[in-house]
Image (cartoon, rainbow, N blue to C red):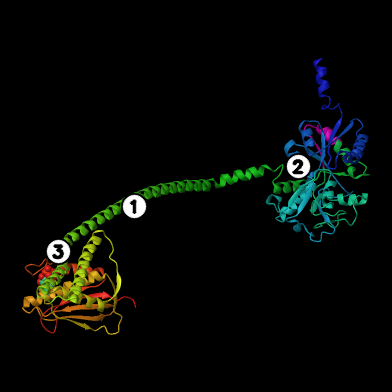
């Protein structure tokens, strides 16, 4: 029972004793193949009556699977496929097909690249760069691989995207359709197919052209060299005696049909060469081998590059870490510096404040000194009024004049106090544009009002027509002039003649206007002149030695200079200050 079931299951794959099972590549579809190859089956049946001939029409993969499974004894296939089967399954050719009687079996199969006749831009295979090429499939020998090899020889390779293959699959007439309807610019077909279709009437004679035609002695146009024809090969397990029988039958066939034209087995070496060049089956291992050999050849270089990259990466990382560390240190140093600067600024502000307070201390010391002048003037006018009243000479004009001067002086005293308060408040003194001549005259007049027996003050104006305006705090400049005039009177008095006149000169020193107060007093030796502007330098018993140091500060605050010199034309002293002339 078990044996029966086994036999039933194995029936489709087991040949009956004496059967000759032949697998045929159906490259134009099974129906066409049947029509085409039936005569061969019948002819062989006649030649080998003891062996029923079983023909199977299979595509490339089915054919290989049938060989592998031992389902067929012989295979009829194209040259490229034969080479693959030979390499993979040990099939052995026993005959090679001849297209024409008497043809060289080694040069029977080629490929043609067809284009539509009106495509004038396509003349040779070189024109296929960038074009779409229809073909049956990448595994089709005459339908693709032969043309691929030709194009590759011209450095046009689909693997570099030099042209775009468009695979239509079998039957090969689909390639012609693709070119006809414009899906493809060109089509790769087995040579002689075009001529056959023209003969049958399915293609017009002037519809297509063949690119780079060669082999003019051949009846068919071809774009490639000719390779051996199809192979009739025996499977590895086929008994040698059977192979010999079939071979003799093939070579003895009556040549009435092309499928019956078989010659001695050709040399398939050119096919091997072509497939090796393309590095496709059965030479596809070369691609892997190439990769492996490249690795084997270049691994030291690769390793060196890898080591270099790792070192470079390590170096980059280290540099990055160092940069980050330095950046951190730098920003810490910068913030420390900022903090230090902030401290210094704060300390400076405190010192300025202290210095201001100390100056304020000085000023408060001289306050009495400064206020003394207006108060003395007020006192003088008040005494004068009293004297005139007692003498019965008090006129209204005198009262009005004295009252006016008293009011002026009290206002002046108030301004002195105000300016000291401003200074303490760190307020900038207001600057006014004043004429220096008028300012000097005003100060002289004021000075003379302050003293009971005031000397004459002579004004020597050498400014002429030059602009004589200055941008000043008038009160402070007045204060300086009064101070210089008072010192001049003191020097006259010490010299014994308080009534000597004082001369004020005004002249131009470049962009500066110079005001000089010249007296004929005791003068000052060179050593004393060095200390003249220092605070608390005084030669007077009741002096404080602050007047000139304050004057110096005021003049310098006005961008001028205070200086003292021994006059060249006689005794006494000349103390002068400069002020920048205001822009006209
Ligand atoms: P003080 O008048 O209170 O002494 P100053 O600062 O005004 O303070 O003057 C300082 C000193 O400069 C005076 O004591 C005096 O010795 C000297 N001095 C100033 N002006 C003259 C001058 N015109 N002639 C001689 N000596 C002067």
Which is nearer the N-term, disc 2 or disc 3? Answer: 2
Q: Of tags 3 and 1, which is closer to the observer? A: 3
Per the rendering, the mark at residue 83 is 2
Residue 435 picture quarter: bottom left
Please check the rendered image and state whether residue 19 is part of the magenta-colored stretch, yes or no.
Answer: no
Any part of residue 460 in sight: yes
Instruction: Identify which residue, 431 or 103, lies in the foreground.
Output: 431
Left or right: residue 352 versus residue 240 is left
Residue shown at the point (84%, 59%) measured from the top left: 118
Residue topped by disc 3: 368
Residue topped by disc 1: 334
Report if the CB atoms under discs 1 and 2 are less than 8 Å apart.
no
At label 1, counting other C-alpha atoms closer than 10 Å, the crowd grade (few under 14, some 14-19, many 20 or more) is few
Any part of residue 524 in sight: no
The answer to whether the residue bearing label 3 lies less than 8 angstroms from the nearest atom of ligand 1 is: no
Q: Determine the residue located farthest toward the front in the rendered image.
A: 392
- Residue 584: give x, y in percent of width and height: 34, 78
Q: Which residues are magenta?
A: 231-245
Which is nearer the N-term, disc 3 or disc 1? Answer: 1
């Amino acid at each position: 029972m078990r044996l029966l079931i086994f036999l039933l299951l194995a029936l489709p794959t087991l040949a009956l004793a004496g059967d000759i099972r032949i697998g045929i590549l159906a490259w134009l579809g099974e129906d066409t193949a049947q029509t085409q190859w039936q005569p061969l089956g019948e002819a062989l049946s006649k030649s080998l009556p003891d062996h029923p001939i079983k023909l199977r029409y299979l595509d490339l993969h089915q054919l290989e699977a049938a060989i592998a499974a031992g389902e067929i004894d012989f295979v009829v296939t194209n040259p490229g496929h034969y080479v693959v089967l030979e390499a993979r399954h040990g099939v052995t050719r026993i005959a090679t097909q001849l297209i024409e009687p008497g043809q060289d079996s080694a040069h029977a199969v080629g490929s043609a690249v067809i284009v539509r006749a009106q495509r004038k831009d396509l003349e040779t295979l070189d024109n296929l760069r960038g074009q779409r090429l229809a073909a049956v499939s990448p595994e089709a020998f005459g339908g693709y691989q032969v043309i691929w090899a030709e194009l590759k020889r011209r450095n046009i390779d689909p693997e570099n995207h030099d042209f775009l293959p468009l695979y239509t699959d079998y039957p090969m007439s689909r390639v012609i359709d693709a070119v006809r309807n414009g899906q493809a610019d060109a089509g790769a077909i087995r040579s002689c197919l075009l001529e056959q279709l023209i003969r049958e009437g399915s293609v017009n004679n002037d519809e297509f052209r063949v690119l780079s035609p060669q082999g003019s002695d051949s009846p068919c146009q071809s774009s490639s060299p000719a390779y051996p024809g199809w192979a009739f090969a025996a499977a590895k397990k086929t008994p040698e005696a059977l192979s010999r029988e079939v071979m003799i039958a093939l070579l003895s066939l009556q040549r009435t049909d092309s499928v019956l034209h078989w010659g001695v087995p050709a040399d398939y070496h050119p096919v091997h060469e072509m497939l090796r060049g393309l590095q496709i089956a059965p030479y596809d291992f070369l691609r892997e081998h190439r990769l492996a050999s490249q690795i084997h050849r270049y691994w030291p270089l690769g390793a060196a590059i890898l080591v270099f990259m790792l070192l470079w990466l390590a170096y980059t990382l280290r540099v990055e870490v160092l940069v980050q560390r330095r950046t951190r240190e730098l920003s810490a140093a910068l913030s420390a510096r900022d903090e230090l600067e902030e401290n210094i600024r704060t300390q400076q502000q405190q010192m300025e404040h202290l210095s201001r307070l100390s100056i304020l201390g000085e000023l408060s010391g001289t306050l009495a000194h400064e206020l003394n002048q207006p108060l003395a003037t007020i006192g003088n006018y008040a005494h004068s009024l009293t004297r005139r009243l007692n003498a019965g000479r008090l006129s209204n004009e005198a009262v009005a004049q004295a009252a006016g001067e008293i009011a002026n002086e009290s206002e002046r005293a108030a301004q002195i106090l105000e300016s000291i308060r401003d200074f303490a408040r760190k307020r900038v003194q207001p600057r006014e544009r004043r004429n220096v001549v008028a300012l000097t005259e005003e100060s002289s007049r004021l000075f003379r009002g302050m003293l009971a027996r005031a000397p004459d003050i002579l004004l020597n104006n050498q400014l002429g027509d030059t602009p004589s305006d200055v941008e000043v705090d008038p009160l402070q400049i007045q204060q300086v002039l009064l101070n210089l005039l008072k010192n001049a009177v003191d020097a006259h008095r010490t010299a014994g003649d308080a009534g000597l006149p004082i001369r004020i000169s005004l002249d131009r020193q470049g962009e500066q206007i110079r005001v000089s107060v010249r007296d004929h007093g005791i003068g000052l030796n060179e050593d004393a002149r060095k200390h003249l502007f220092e605070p608390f330098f005084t030669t007077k018993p009741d002096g404080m030695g602050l007047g000139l140091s304050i004057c110096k500060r005021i003049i310098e605050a006005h961008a001028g200079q205070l200086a003292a010199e021994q006059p060249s034309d006689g005794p006494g002293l000349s103390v002068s200050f400069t002020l920048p002339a205001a822009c006209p």
